[in-house]
Image (cartoon, rainbow, N blue to C red):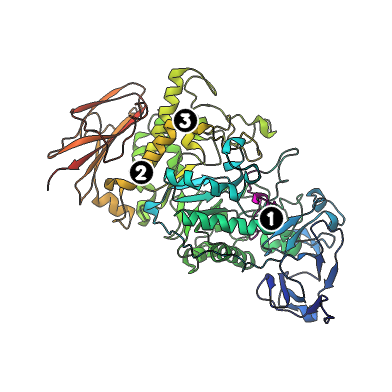
Amino acid sequence: MELAHGNEVYTWPGEAFPLGASVKQNGVNFSLYSKDATRVTLHLFASADAASPQHSFELNPSIHKRGHYWFIFVGNIGHGQVYGFQVDGPWLPEKGLRFDKDKVLIDPYSQAICFGRNYSRERAIGPGRNMDASMKSIVVDQSDFDWQDVMAPRHSLNDTVIYEMHVGGFTKHPSSGVDKGKRGTFAGIIDKIPYLKEMGVTAVELMPVQQFDVNDAPQGRQNYWGYSPINFFAVHAGYSVENDPLAAINEFKTLVRELHRADIEVILDVVFNHTAEGDENGPTFCFKGLQNGAYYITDKETGNYANYSGCGNTCNANHSVLRRMIIDALHFWVTEMHVDGFRFDLASVLARDSNGHPMKEPPLLWTIDTDPILCSTKIIAEAWDAAGLYQVGSFIGDRWNEWNGKYRDDIRAFWRGDSGTVSRFASRVLGSPDIYCSRHHSPHRSVNFITAHDGFTLNDLVSYSEKHNLANGEGNNDGDNHNISSNYGVEGPTINKEIEEMRNRQCKNMLTTLFLSLGTPMLNMGDEVRRTQQGNNNAYCQDNEISWFDWSLLDKHQDMLRFVTGLSQIRRAEPTIDWNMHISLSSVVDDVQIRWHGLQPDQPDWSEDSHSLALTVNHPITQDELYVICNAYWDPLEFTLPDRRNSEWHLLVNTAKSSPYDIYLPDEAPIYPHDTILATGRSMIVMVAKSTQE
């Protein structure tokens, strides 16, 4: 060990727990897992740009290793110290070992990561030393932040409206009105909190904010979406006003605090299914050079990486080491960063064992389900992976909610006018009982969405029949070909008034369906004002106006914004769509008075060629009744209203009407005095009858 001389750096044996860099009273304790390493060296750097370390400490296994953990205490250093490791060991890829003593590795538990001016992804791939061009870790002391006693909202799922957004894209466009220095940052979102609040958003779902590698993209492009994590703890420095990894931490905390102050929750889109290290031809940043087989699923004969994620590698999430790290990361984001929930990207990957086989009782997912620190969080699974493991409706546990891909597809198909869709449409509106009832799931198990970051925006769904991804540089071969979209006569933008009216109406039809359906609604950023990506349905590498929110659309499509705001208010105010009294979806189906109708009351048309459906929902306490007409047929249809004794029908929504006559709040809705109503082709009508009995 090295002893202190004044304020000079010194070392002590240290402790194995906790993992990572832990700030102590007189220095920092470092702990690292590597079962098969033969030599570990800790380097301390003066800055991210440093080509050589100020201090290096080779860890003595007899002093600095216990079990599979290497550790050391370094005195007279603290918050802001830049560091990295070099780890030597066997190069046996076929056995899952890929040690490279020349590469500088970041700490997998580091809470901040820095990139010097000479950072090079390529230098982390090829042979040779890369100390001058490597990313590096930073020691972080999380204690210096004032949360001002602002508490988390903790909304029930019944009261939740999720808004999926990209942190950068939300305010990066010059039209955002945000100060230039704050555009595309956490601070930029704070300026837009009144907008989110007015729209009725109760939770923002942030696309990845874990530090990612912007260079993990085709040559000449950048990774914009962020589904390329470098580690699971650090905040992405690119979303900081100062573009500084330490500043990013407090800026993120400030965003969370201010959203909470506005009664809005924060859900993180987390990527635990793969990392930025890619396949066997990818870079070595961290996991590969520490204990490759503990972090990735590899072929037991060749050592090549399994690719259930579609991104080159697949995390070995149920290995004890990575499983612990993922849980530690979730705890960190909840306890230190105060987030309210997580959406797990390609969550079905997390159900695979070390051989890639699906597990009936995956330890990681059950641990998340039952963890006491996570018990108040919202946990949402994208319940499929890129290799065909589709678990919508069969994902484990009672606490998990699921992105309902079948909801997205069936709602799109019905409103496009596809045949044979009426029954599936009815099931999706009712919370998908065909998927969720058998397991007695919550009425809110289904996270309903029409569009998300991946795929067409709502505007493009009704403006393009084909994807237009040439800007991605992959010959239009990337992105999904199954979009269930239509251009209604012209591909892309048009000045044709009839087509434009049809597109606007179809947007309103799908949004109305979304907000009235049983389940938890999720709105994609900008859909409320018909944001376009010019037909690009895979804009992961487009950090430009293709992806950014164009705020001038608030004026161009103010009728749509007003409509969405009204839908949110109706969802909150109308008791006939309040399902809190029911503990399971099956109890809703059994107990709620739901009647299905066609053009005549109680005569629904379930045939293959049917394109319309109506229903009534009766509230068991207030006796209020909701009547909904969905006409996906291309011609007008006349519907006879169900009889309501002692009350009158009030018109809430008619998507065929122009603003402001397309939507009313329940206490402002005009009386509809007739027994029949004409539903325009491809339109939706919502009415409510309030009981007049005392």
Local secondary structure at mark 2: helix
Give the main secondary structure of the magenta stretch: loop
| Three-letter amino acid code of the residue under disc 3 | His
> Left or right: where does residue 527 sit relative to residue 599?
right
Q: Is residue 58 left or right of residue 275?
A: right
The amino acid pointed to by label 1 is Ile
Mark 3 vs 2, N-terminal side: 3
Judge depth for marks 2 and 1 and give the one in front: 2
User: In the rendered image, which residue does mark 2 sit on?
Assistant: 569
Left or right placement of residue 207 versus residue 296 in this view: left
In the image, residue 55 above or below residue 535: below
x and y percent of residue 90 in the render?
81, 65
Q: Which residue is mark 1?
A: 230
Crowding at dot 3, Cα within 10 Å, few <14 / some 14-19 / many 20+, comes out as: some
Is residue 232 shown in magenta?
yes
Range of magenta residues: 224-245
Nearer the N terminus, badge 2 or badge 1? 1
Q: Percent position (x, y) of residue 542?
A: 65, 37
Could one spot residue 123 in this view of the protein?
yes
Q: Which residue is more in the foreground, 93 or 190? A: 190
Q: Amino acid at mark 2?
A: Gln
| Image spot of residue 422 (x, y percent) | 35, 34
